[in-house]
Image (spheres, rainbow, N blue to C red):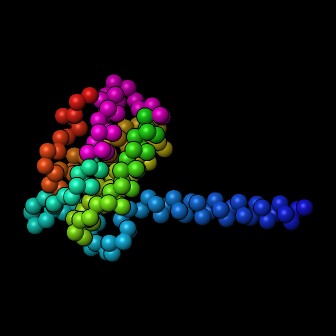
Amino acid sequence: MTRRKFLISGLVLALAGVGTFALVQLHRPAEHGHGQHGTSELVLNDGKRWATDAPLRQGLERIRDAVAPIVAASTARPLTKDEGTALSGAIKDQVQYLVENCKLEPKADAALHVLLNDFLEGADAVVAGDPNSKAGLERIMQALNLYPQYFDHPGWQPVSAQPE
């Protein structure tokens, strides 16, 4: 009987380890089959903004639309745990959508992944950190504000211009 408990415990620990490894790999958008990008910083395309495709525009608009009401609410009060969780989930869903659907040339893709990393780190911070801290939301906003400086997105509206 004790051997059986030992085997079950070992199996549970092994499954937990595999699950943790899978989650870590899921949140590593910089490695999704495009090979080495050669850069890990935001750069322009010879002084011009990078071209965007429909999935990139759609995904970033969805992130912006998820952030806008949270930003408006957070000016009057701290984020609630439920708001942080919902925002984090929405951002992670869109980052996953972008990783699966956005097809940019390698250098543009590498620049985009700098922003995606910021979105993911901000999303993690809004659920893991102090609810009164705005650091996660600030990281997300910084990425949203940098996006139109590096990517040509016709009709892009910053969060502050979003209707509430």
161 with respect to 30 (left or right): left
Measured as percent of width and height from the top left, residue 91 is found at 37, 47
Residue furthest to the left: 47
Measured as percent of width and height from the top left, residue 47 is found at 9, 63
Looking at the picture, tell me which residue is in the foreground, 53 or 15.
53
7 with respect to 142 (left or right): right
Q: Is residue 129 visible?
A: no
Q: Is residue 86 above or below residue 154?
A: above
118 with respect to 156 (left or right): right
Residue furthest to the right: 1
Looking at the picture, tell me which residue is in the foreground, 131 or 102.
102
Q: Say which quarter of the image contains residue 56.
A: bottom left
Classify the position of the N terminus by image quarter: bottom right
Q: Say which quarter of the image contains residue 107.
A: bottom left
Q: Which residues are magenta?
A: 61-82
Residue beneath the point at 69% across and 61% down: 13
Measured as percent of width and height from the top left, residue 92 is found at 40, 50
